[in-house]
Amino acid sequence: MKTTHFHTCNLCEAMCGIEIEHRGDEIIAIRGDKDDPFSRGHICPKAVALQDLHQDPDRLRHPVKRTIDGWVPISWDEALDETARRLHEVQQRHGRNSVATYFGNPTAHNHGALFTLLQFQQALHTRQRYSATSADQLPHQLAAWQLFGNQLMFPIPDIDHTDYFLVIGGNPLASNGSIMTVPDVKNRFKDLKKRGGKLVVIDPRLTETAAVASEHHFIRPGTDVYLLLSIIQVLFKELLVAPGKLDKLLDGKSDLQKLTENWTPEKVTEAVGISPEAIRKLARDIAAAPRAAIYGRVGLTTSPHSTLSAWLVYVLNIITGNLDREGGVMFSKPAFDIVALGALGGEAGSFDRYRSRVHGYPEFSGEFPVTTLADEMLTPGQGQVKAFVTHAGNPVLSCPDGGKLDTALEGLEFMVSIDLYINETSRHANIILPPTGQLEHGQFDPIFQAVAVRNVVKYTPPAFDKPEGALHDWEILNGLATRLKRLKAQTRRERLQIAASDRFMRRIKDTGIIDLGLRLGPYGTGGKVMAALKKDGLHTLPQQAWKLLRGKQKGLTLQTLKDNPHGVDLGPLQPALPERLFTRDQRINLVPALYFRALQGLPVPKTPKPDEMLIIGRRHIRSNNSWMHNSQRLVKGKGRCNVLIHSQDAERLGVVEGDDLVLSSDAGSITLPVWVADDIMPGVISVPHGWGHDRQGVQLDVARRTGGASINDVLTSKRVESVTAMAQLNGVPVKVEAAAKPKPKPRSKPKKAVADA
Ligand SMILES: Nc1nc2c(c(=O)[nH]1)N[C@H]1C(S)=C(S)[C@@H](COP(=O)(O)OP(=O)(O)OC[C@H]3O[C@@H](n4cnc5c(=O)[nH]c(N)nc54)[C@H](O)[C@@H]3O)O[C@H]1N2
Ligand SMILES: Nc1nc2c(c(=O)[nH]1)N[C@H]1C(S)=C(S)[C@@H](COP(=O)(O)OP(=O)(O)OC[C@H]3O[C@@H](n4cnc5c(=O)[nH]c(N)nc54)[C@H](O)[C@@H]3O)O[C@H]1N2
Ligand code: SF4
Ligand SMILES: [Mo]
């Protein structure tokens, strides 16, 4: 019998509602769910590929252990016991910080993992914690914490009501938005223009988003900080600073004015590549727009000076009165309030409480930057990392100097990967623990609901029953945490507590935590119970909440969501200040000390060297970081891992379409075919990340045959952002040369980048 199941796609941040038509375990079709009030039927090609993921013969279905005879299946008990025992042994031998952990991007898309990872970290108790954050959004989190008192308090563009949307270093038409959950973004942009609004894009490439924009400015990679400073300089100079109702909450306005007064458009123009007139016009247009939203994303947060740039984006919104107003950038009111819960659990944010062993890099929110991960493994001495845990990540392909990490993993005493595949990273593991696939677990998005452009909430139960003997991510993490704690427990009392907490988690399950979170949230029983919760840390919150909430059944609960399988719309974003501020004095200091110092140390912009080539990344709608490349329907056609280069540079280097280029740096070198098109700035090349699957031992049959190479084999981990030691993945100089040519080919005409979309 054919049945229809409603679900949420969890591959990117857009949370598109999908409709899965199936007969038993066989998927007949995956379509957009027209009744999802948020995504309105929109999907991208990746949603359909969920079927390939579900059926992929390469996807692991049971734990495996590496032996001299290859990978052998083992039972869950054996796998969890051995993993916990070996991690514990390494810690006993070499100290607690000898085990490192890395949580990758899909962790954020998996509520079960989010609910149990802190408990796992608490059990492991290591300072060697890493995640994709330091190759991604760390500067946004730092700025949100410094300005608004909470690292998760992200200002979200109110795209549906704005009159002027400035996108700096983001390409939502390919990525479907990030720290801005915005399904159906193309139509939302159309609506913006229909209302008479403007979409303006600042990007070194004429991207898919730039192609539909009202205005696009090429910018030299890594110079956003200078552009932003000069825009702010102009605003002060021309008396256009107008924070409006926010004014009474602000401190540091005159500091900001002083710090920016010398950054005139004339001073930055050469480095930035945008004329002084255009910079002044940008400033005036932002100021003149009735409602403007300024948004910076990955191109801005993973390039030089990202700490300052991310902060300045928020500052620019504030001083033009666009923070916390309709059509500007606003704070969400999430039903499952991770922002408030995080603060209650002591996770509002932290920076530089301690430093990493090898390079002395600062901790951020309990993590070190990925730029030091390999060195912590390779550098001998007290505290050297000897064991490694990865969860939903592929750092060999996603972190700079991936090749070095690849080597470092070979020298470990023990490694475990909680992952669906034997990929470039997990192939080094001793044990792989595969969780249920995307359609075999329920879907709830506490993070992305909190960064959505409307207040929305949705839960979908699993589309397919959990296969016999399979475990969800939360069961794996809970299982490991419980075992580790048991191994470390000293007293009978501790052991009883551990057993009780394990029983509690297994009884209430991931869905019980969703229910508790909703009932604690602003649409549930809310404030009173929240206020009564003790600050014992996030891992004990569920037990406390359970006791306090027992018997109370008011407002939004999990049942509400079960009754509304297409999701619940809670309305547009609403002004929330000052109440929502988490700063101690409920004020906003525009120039926290950290930024003051960083700005004083900011070097004058360099004049670009004539032959220097800067590398940037590139996302594509049919790819998803380093994975989903095992889906034939997504990777088919012309290979997408190539070097996009301007015809002027191609000519200088003597290459034509289809030739190979060699990119090299201290970190290593890669060879890729060229794609000549004038949709990129001269002096800049663009290469997507997450490719290069043809490595020994990788068990991704389709992906292995896609060709390409990893850009992170040529990006060095030595080049780090000066404040946070964040990865630099964009705007990095690399050496570019033509590969030795077999025979000359006729010159082909440059093609438009957008035509490939
Ligand atoms: N040069 C360059 N490098 C980059 C970037 C760039 O733009 N340029 N982008 C950076 C960014 S923004 C990010 S977020 C990172 C991403 O990098 P990572 O987070 O390190 O890796 P992913 O490619 O997302 O790999 C995800 C892995 O998780 C597994 N997986 C998928 N779903 C689940 C699940 O539900 N549970 C478990 N346990 N496993 C699952 C997949 O099989 C896959 O192996 O890359 C960063 N690296
Ligand atoms: N299809 C697809 N969707 C995805 C992903 C994916 O891999 N594929 N990954 C997901 C993840 S993990 C994330 S974090 C988001 C990221 O979402 P976005 O931030 O929208 O990601 P990108 O498409 O990489 O856009 C970054 C843009 O910055 C530009 N850029 C590079 N350097 C600079 C610079 O120095 N200054 C400026 N102004 N621009 C610069 C690039 O040309 C590029 O157009 O996408 C998510 N969605
Ligand atoms: S945009 Fe595509 S990948 Fe992202 S949630 Fe929607 S369907 Fe899934
Ligand atoms: Mo990301």
Image (cartoon, grey):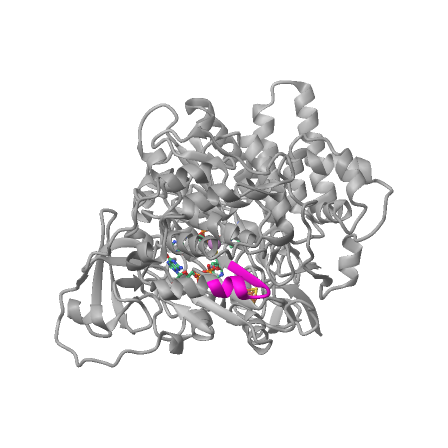
- The answer to which image quadrant residue 18 occupies is bottom right
Highlighted magenta segment, given as a residue range? 284-294
Could you tell me if residue 131 is visible in this image? Answer: no
Quadrant of the image for the N terminus?
bottom right
In-front residue for pair 521/412: 521
In this rendering, position of residue 440 left or right of residue 424: right
Q: Find residue 679 and report its image quarter.
A: bottom left
Of 339 and 403, the residue lying toward us: 339
Q: Is residue 556 left or right of residue 374?
A: right
In the foreground, 513 or 729: 729
Is residue 411 in the magenta section?
no
The picture places residue 722, in percent across and down from the top left corner, at 36, 40
Q: Is residue 287 in the magenta section?
A: yes
Q: Quadrant of ligand 3?
A: bottom right
Query: Can I make out residue 703 in this image?
Result: yes
Residue 329 picture location, percent across and down: 59, 57
Vertically, is 229 above or below 491?
Answer: below
- In the rendered image, residue 340, in percent from the top left (x then y), is placed at 67, 42
Residue beneath the point at 51% across and 30% down:
85
> Compared with residue 747, is residue 410 higher up or lower down, i.e. above or below?
above
- 8 left or right, relative to 633: right
Q: Position of residue 265 (x, y in %)?
A: 36, 57
Q: Quadrant of residue 500?
A: top right
